[in-house]
Image (cartoon, grey):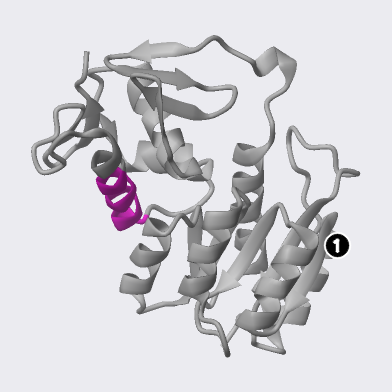
């Protein structure tokens, strides 16, 4: 059941955003009572929303409109949500926010491993959904000329923050947005220990409750991509009971 009080449309001010600017959102959700409420709410908050009610239609709409962000239910008729998540990430760097049932922790973790930016468990409130969308859109917004910065060398790696690229010995390393955001925060303060809450603030803008497993999954994925032996990491160290730090020189 959804709390009716949480589904009341509310207009929000988005700091740093021009409310006249419309982002394209693709909602893939088979709940025909929930989806229209979500669509109306997001449109009231200056977002352009397309809706697909099953996985196959969702993929066709994704290819047709090229959305900035996809709100993706995992339990779908036809093509399932995890398959769609994998296909979308292989084709595009659009934001992905997955919707899951409260007890489906495994699906949430798999979704993050496939490149989803965030997840939200049902039932949820519309203001929280908007906050999650806002945080993802803020992270994927192209940097202005004032935000352009020079490449940074961190150990054997080169970080291009303006283009959000990581390379080692000239070879690009493909990271999801969340992985890049966490890496950026760790490498800017080498040796400093960051708690999971602090890393979640970077990934989600500090607007949602902490899901420790999400950070651990992103760290595990990062290690798999940058460490010689992910089981014996030398760049991203775990400080037991506290969090993580960048130890690479």
Mark 1, residues whose alpha carbon is within 10 Å: few (<14), some, or many (≥20)?
A: some
Residue linked to disc 1: 44
**Figure check: 65 above or below 52:** above
Q: Position of residue 154 (x, y in %)?
A: 33, 15
Q: As drawn, is 241 to the left or to the right of 208?
A: left
Instruction: Tell me where residue 127 appears, x and y as whole percent.
Output: 66, 61
Q: Position of residue 166 (x, y in %)?
A: 43, 27
Predominant secondary structure, magenta span: helix
Q: Is residue 138 above or below residue 216?
A: above
Residue lying farthest to the left in this orientation: 232
Quarter of the image for residue 47 reads: bottom right
In this picture, is 155 found above or below 111? Answer: above
| Residue 215 lies in the magenta stretch | yes
Stretch in magenta: 211-221
Q: Could you say which quadrant of the image residue 228 lies in?
A: top left
Query: Which quarter of the figure is the C terminus placed in?
Result: top left
Q: Is residue 54 left or right of residue 22?
A: left
- Say what secondary structure mark 1 lies in: helix
């Amino acid at each position: 059941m959804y709390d009716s009080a949480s589904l009341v449309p509310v207009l929000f001010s988005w700091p740093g955003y021009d409310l006249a600017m419309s982002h394209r959102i693709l909602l893939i959700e088979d709940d025909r009572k929930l989806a229209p409420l979500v669509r109306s709410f997001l449109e009231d908050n200056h977002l352009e929303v397309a809706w697909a009610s099953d996985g196959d239609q969702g993929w066709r709409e994704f290819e047709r409109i090229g959305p900035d962000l996809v709100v993706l239910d995992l339990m779908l008729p036809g093509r399932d949500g995890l398959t769609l998540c994998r296909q979308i990430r292989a084709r595009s760097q659009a934001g992905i926010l997955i919707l899951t049932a409260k007890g489906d922790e495994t699906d949430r973790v798999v979704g993050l491993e496939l490149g989803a930016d965030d997840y939200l468990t049902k039932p949820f409130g519309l203001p929280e959904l908007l906050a999650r969308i806002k945080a993802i859109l803020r992270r994927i917004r192209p940097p202005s000329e004032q935000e352009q910065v020079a490449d940074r060398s961190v150990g054997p790696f080169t970080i291009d923050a303006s283009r959000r690229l990581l390379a080692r010995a000239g070879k690009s390393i493909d990271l999801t947005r969340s992985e890049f955001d966490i890496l950026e925060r760790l490498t800017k303060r080498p040796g400093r220990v960051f708690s999971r809450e602090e890393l979640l603030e970077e990934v989600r803008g500090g607007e949602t409750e902490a899901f420790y497993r999400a950070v651990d999954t992103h760290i595990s994925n990062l290690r798999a991509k940058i460490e010689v032996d992910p089981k014996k990491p030398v760049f991203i160290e775990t400080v037991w009971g506290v969090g993580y730090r960048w130890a690479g020189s």
